[in-house]
Image (cartoon, rainbow, N blue to C red):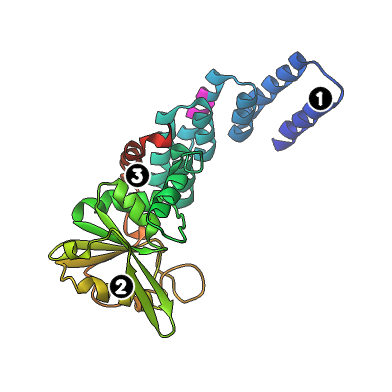
């Protein structure tokens, strides 16, 4: 099956090198597209349709891709068409399959996170306004998914700079009032400092959620919790970017080093993706699509 398709591609390259006309090359691409469809090679089919700028055929192939769970190729087709509803259908399907990477890729493209005035640039500008020296981006889909489930349950969110900043920014876009503090390991302890503009006295008697990327030794988390508890909140929960791992090797949280005192600890794995489209739409609305 693949030999026939590859041979056709070689013939196409030969045509180009031999100076074939534009019409001859386009006709060969059409033949390639139809052959790929007959063989079930949807990747090659949608690639050829996009190169031909045949929007009707791209739409048809993208629909077939999504029905046959070729979701990456379906997203490419809908993205080419600017069909944002189609892109959301792909995100929803990726979520149903539990494909974390697929969801993140599709959500990032949908929200244009890396574009000019996109989500990442807005986050860095937000961090700069708070005079944070270092700001790190993480997966948008996992944090937006957590924010959709959790933001409405709390009175305040408090971010640990710099690892908890991105979560703080996303949760703020879901309507949660936030503040930020610096906390870093030093010697056998950890430093702590509230950022200007933070009013920790407002935490008294409130339900608080703390944001950080992970817990490794637990030193900074322990210090941060102690500082929060000075203001006698009603409850303090913790939301982390990185899921638990079995040891200190690799990227993740060492669950046994999470200090006692948090009522609840959340990880991305705590939530399925059943409502990922609603989460994306809510974030999109808050960001204004990331466009001018």
Q: Residue at x 42, y 63 (%)?
A: 162
Q: Is residue 170 above or below residue 180?
A: above
Sort mark 3 into few (<14), some (14-19) or many (20+) by Cα contacts within 10 Å: many
The outermost residue toward the right is 18
The numbered dot on residue 195 is none
Question: Tag 2, which secondary structure?
Answer: helix
**SS type, badge 1:** helix
Closest to the camera, between mark 3 and mark 2, is: 2
Q: Nearer the viewer, residue 35 or 186?
A: 186
Q: Name the residue that disc number 3 marks.
A: 276
- Image coordinates of residue 282 in percent, x first then y, are 31, 40
Q: Magenta stretch mostly in which secondary structure?
A: helix
Q: Give the residue at the far left of this rendering.
A: 205
Gap in angstroms between the C-alphas marked 3 and 2: 31 Å
Does residue 98 appear in the picture of this structure?
no
Which residue has dot 2 on it?
A: 224
Q: Residue furthest front?
A: 196
CA neighbours of label 2 inside 10 A, class few (<14), some (14 to 19), many (20+): many
- Looking at the picture, tell me which residue is in the foreground, 162 or 10: 162
Q: Is residue 91 left or right of residue 179?
A: right
Residue 174 visible (yes or no): yes
Tell me the distance, in whole angstroms, between the alpha carbons under discs 2 and 1: 64 Å
- The mark that comes first in sequence, 3 or 2, is 2
Picture residue at 47% right of the left edge, 45% below the top: 121
Quickly name the residue at label 1: 16
Alpha carbons under labels 1 and 3: distance apart:
44 Å
Q: Which residues are magenta?
A: 59-63
Q: Which type of secondary structure does the marked residue at label 3 adopt?
A: helix
């Amino acid at each position: 099956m693949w030999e026939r398709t590859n041979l056709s591609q070689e013939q196409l390259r030969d045509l180009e090198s031999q100076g074939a006309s534009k019409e001859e090359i386009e006709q060969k691409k059409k033949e390639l597209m139809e052959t790929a469809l007959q063989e079930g090679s949807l990747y090659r089919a949608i690639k050829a349709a996009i190169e031909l700028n045949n929007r009707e055929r791209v739409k048809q192939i993208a629909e077939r891709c999504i029905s046959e769970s070729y979701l990456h190729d379906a997203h490419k087709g809908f993205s080419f068409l600017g069909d944002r509803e189609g892109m959301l259908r792909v995100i929803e399907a990726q979520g149903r399959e539990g494909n974390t990477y697929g969801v993140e890729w599709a959500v990032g493209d949908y929200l244009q996170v890396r574009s000019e005035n996109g989500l990442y640039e807005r986050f860095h500008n937000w961090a700069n306004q708070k005079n944070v020296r270092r700001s790190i981006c993480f997966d948008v889909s996992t944090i937006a998914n957590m924010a959709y489930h959790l933001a409405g349950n709390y009175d305040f969110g408090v971010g640990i700079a710099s690892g908890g900043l991105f979560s703080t920014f996303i949760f703020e876009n879901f309507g949660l009032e936030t503040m930020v503090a610096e906390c870093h390991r030093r010697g056998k302890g950890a430093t702590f400092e509230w950022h200007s503009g933070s009013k920790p006295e407002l935490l008294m008697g409130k339900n608080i959620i703390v944001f950080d990327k992970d817990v490794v030794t637990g030193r900074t988390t322990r210090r941060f919790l102690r500082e929060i508890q000075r203001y006698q909140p009603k409850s303090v929960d913790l939301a982390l970017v990185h899921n638990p791992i079995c040891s200190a090797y690799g990227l993740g949280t060492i669950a046994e080093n999470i200090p006692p005192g948090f009522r609840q600890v959340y990880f991305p794995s705590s939530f399925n993706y059943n409502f990922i489209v609603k989460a994306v739409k809510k974030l999109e609305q808050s960001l204004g699509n990331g466009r001018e």
